Image (cartoon, rainbow, N blue to C red):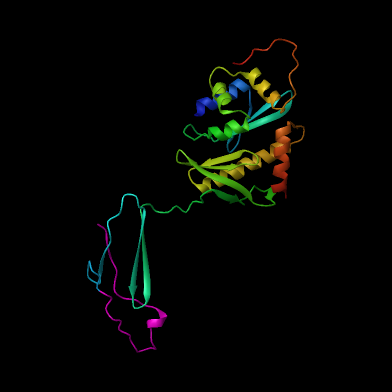
Amino acid sequence: MNLRDFDIIENKLGLQTRDAKHHYAWFVYNGVTVARTMRSHGNRKFLPEHSIRKQLHLTSDQFAELIGCNLKLDGYIKILADKGLIAKPEPTKPTEASS
Amino acid sequence: MATAEIAPVVSSPATQGPPGVSTTLPEPEVREHGSPQEIVLPAMLPDKTTIEIAVEAKGAKLSVTLLDKIPSARPEKVVLFAGGLGPNLRLLKAIPLEVSVEEEQIVLTWAETNDFACGDNTGEALEHFGQSIRELYEHLHAHGVALGVDLLRVRDVLDRYVTRK
């Protein structure tokens, strides 16, 4: 993965970020910090896809879909809920199913 | 064909007499393929990366190992992080990190928490790991921050290794 892929994830999931020695990103759902990841500063820095994927609790296929177009925020929330990492969202309205 | 030259002088406590007395060693045995100063080594076989040659002279044994690659001083699989965590935190025990090399970068991974750090070399990666752990600790212990189940687990793990000074 490259910096652009990281930015896609950051924007798609609405990660809260903080720049210090490195660039830290946190996924906050309903006021609860659920997952985190990070990358080093600099455009040419290597990003360990495997480690970032595991920090976000995704399989390889799900991670590829997240960088691509198929997995969006609601799909990510459903994945976390299915894994018991967050409470299942209330089905007040139909959610867009991720393929 | 590779060749190596070895000076026919062997010095050891066993060959050194009292001051003023010198010992002349007999000439090393002339080998089949060369003079005493030149030892002819067999050609490297394609499927061999190491050749060991034993040379014996007056009871002393010299072993020469030829390597295709210079061995790396980098730890093969695991390194223990025991570096600094800034003025406010200290380690309770060393953190075991898995070492891997990806795209010429050293990647250190703490499997228990899935934390990682990268660097051009192991030292830089360790420094980055310390910075990340410091940031993680402060965030997970910040007042008013609610944590999900996995980050609560990560905080528990972290508390076994890191504490405030």
* Res. A63 image quadrant: top right
- Quadrant location of the C terminus of chain A in the rendered image: top right
Q: Residue at x 70, y 10 (%)?
A: A94
Residue B45 among magenta residues: no
Vertical placement of residue A52 versus A70, above or below = below
**Count of picture labels:** 0
Residue B25 among magenta residues: yes
Residue stretch in magenta: B1-29
Taking the image as shown, residue B56 lies to the left or right of residue B163, namely left
Q: Residue at x 68, y 50 (%)?
A: B90
Vertical placement of residue B6 versus A23, above or below = below
Residue B4 in view = yes
Q: Nearer the viewer, residue B5 or B163?
A: B5
Q: Nearer the viewer, residue B64 or A8?
A: B64
Taking the image as shown, residue B73 lies to the left or right of residue A33, namely left
Q: Residue furthest top?
A: A93
How far across and how far down the image is residue B41, in percent?
Answer: 28, 61
How far across and how far down the image is residue A79, in percent?
Answer: 66, 23
Vertical placement of residue A75 versus A25, above or below = above
Q: Nearer the viewer, residue B63 or B6?
A: B63
Vertical placement of residue B25 versus B151, above or below = below
Q: What main secondary structure does the magenta stretch of the protein show?
A: loop
Residue B88 in view = no
How far across and how far down the image is residue A37, in percent?
Answer: 61, 32
Q: Residue at x 51, y 47 (%)?
A: B122
How far across and how far down the image is residue B56, in percent?
Answer: 34, 73
Q: Residue at x 29, y 74 (%)?
A: B8
